[in-house]
Amino acid sequence: MSRTAIFATILSVWFLSGCDSNAPRKNASQEVIALERSALDKWSQANTLGYVDIGAEDVTWFDFNPGPQLRVEGLEAVRNMLAPLAKQIPPHTYELLDPKVQVYGATAILTFHWSGTTTDGQPLGKWKVTSVYHWNDANWHMVHAHWSPVQSQ
């Protein structure tokens, strides 16, 4: 094989590997924050299943609730946990404060503080949140969520 043919083959492989639809995009931070906001926007209108829309089939979830605080495993289990909450969530506004996204290959970790207020001005509390996303099938999918209340100091 000639040097030109070898060079052309290497160049072709390099170019095609750069066109991988499963490679995370350069604007991963903005995409992950936008996904989280899409779920939170639905949540603020008592649609708790916005997180199901962005969740992977094998998603896990830790939330603050009375009882043993067990890990919820799988999209259907998360759906079953979140669906009944819709009746308890008043319409509200929220702030997603100081978001930070750390990207490691096909994994993105989003951390932020959440603060909500009902439409009549009642505070809903403040929460610390970690959401982990994985790039797969040319999309980000939430694979883990952890919500815990900010303790008064």
Image: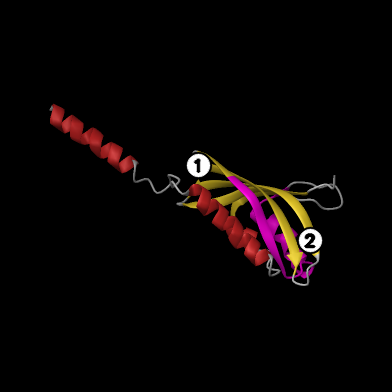
74 left or right of 21 in image: right
- Image-quadrant location for residue 91: bottom right
Disc 1 crowd rating (10 Å Cα; few below 14, some 14-19, many 20+) is some
The segment highlighted magenta reads 72-100
Query: Looking at the rendering, in which quadrant would you find the N terminus?
Result: top left
**Regarding mark 1 in the picture, which secondary structure is present there?**
loop
Mark 1 residue type: Ala
Q: Residue furthest right?
A: 67
Q: Kindly check if marks 2 and 1 are in contact, taking CB atoms under 8 A apart as contact.
A: no
Residue 1 appearing in the image: no
Q: Which x, y percent locates residue 65?
A: 82, 53
Q: Which x, y percent locates residue 11?
A: 24, 36
Residue 19 highlighted magenta (yes or no): no
Q: Which residue is mark 2?
A: 124
**Regarding mark 2 in the picture, which secondary structure is present there?**
strand
Residue 51: image tag: none
Residue 97 highlighted magenta (yes or no): yes
Q: Which residue is mark 1?
A: 106
Task: Using the image, determine if residue 121 lies above or below residue 137.
Answer: below
